[in-house]
Amino acid sequence: MHYQNDVLHPDGKVRVGVAADDPARPRLIASAARLVAAARAHGVPVISVRIAFAPDYSDCLRNCMLFRRVAETGAVVEGQWGAEFYAQLAPLPGETVITHKRNNPFWGSGLEEAVRLTGATRLYLAGIATNHVVEHGARHASDLGYDVTVVADACSTAQPHLHAASLETLAMLADVVQVDAAIAQMKGTQ
């Protein structure tokens, strides 16, 4: 979720996920790439989730600081570089792409239906930021009855203590694992 240029690229406009100068950025990208490649190799459907708004932000509710800042900075505008997926983590042709407009990636986006159509019972969630889209997605998926696995080393926040706190909270709702453990789980589902 949110492996987009404005969120992941050093020149991006959003700083809630990875600080521009964070030396952990290459590890995060490598972990996410390994996770996505393994899912594809093991027949686990990949759904790429992004956030994007109209150029005038008429579809962006500004009832919270996060979305007011998105609009103020001109981030994740539909049709622009910042809203596009980061090249190394972009979906392949034919894979499902969901665009949402709130913290919860399921809210008003079609994600629930897309997941249901896969027939999945377990969801592997990863993305940026751990304490925003990942946490909201994991909570919603858990409420829908899915077994949820949050892949910790394929997630990030700009502030490590928020990442850790979010993962600690999510451990009550989901399996919190590293990429290697997620890949091992996927191998067991073939």
Image: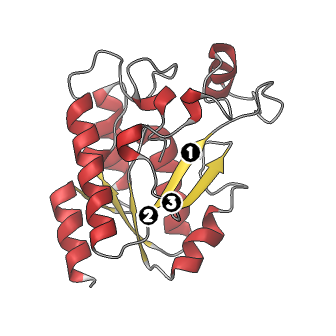
Callout 3 environment at 10 Å: few (<14), some (14 to 19), or many (20+)?
A: few
State the image coordinates of residue 95 (x, y, percent, origin top left): 51, 63
Among all residues in the image, which is located at the extreme right? 58
State the image coordinates of residue 53 (x, y, percent, origin top left): 71, 34
Count of numbered circles on the image = 3
Q: CA distance from mark 2 to mark 1?
A: 13 Å
The residue depicted at 60 percent of the width and 49 percent of the height is 104
Choose between 27 and 155: the one closer to the eye: 27
The answer to whether one can see residue 152 in this image is no
Q: Which residue is mark 2?
A: 46
- Where disc 3 sits, the SS reads loop
Q: Amino acid at mark 1?
A: Arg
State the image coordinates of residue 177 (x, y, percent, origin top left): 23, 58
| Circle nearer the N terminus (1, 3) | 1
The quarter of the displayed image where residue 181 is located: bottom left
- Where disc 1 sits, the SS reads strand
- Where disc 2 sits, the SS reads loop
Q: Which residue is mark 3?
A: 93
**Taking 32 as reference, is 94 above or below it?**
below
Q: CA distance from mark 2 to mark 3?
A: 11 Å
State the image coordinates of residue 27 (x, y, percent, origin top left): 20, 36
The quarter of the displayed image where residue 186 is located: bottom left
The residue depicted at 29 percent of the width and 15 percent of the height is 21
The residue depicted at 36 percent of the width and 25 percent of the height is 158
Q: Amino acid at mark 2?
A: Val
Left or right of 53 on screen, residue 18: left
Q: Which residue is mark 1?
A: 50
Left or right of 161 on screen, residue 80: right
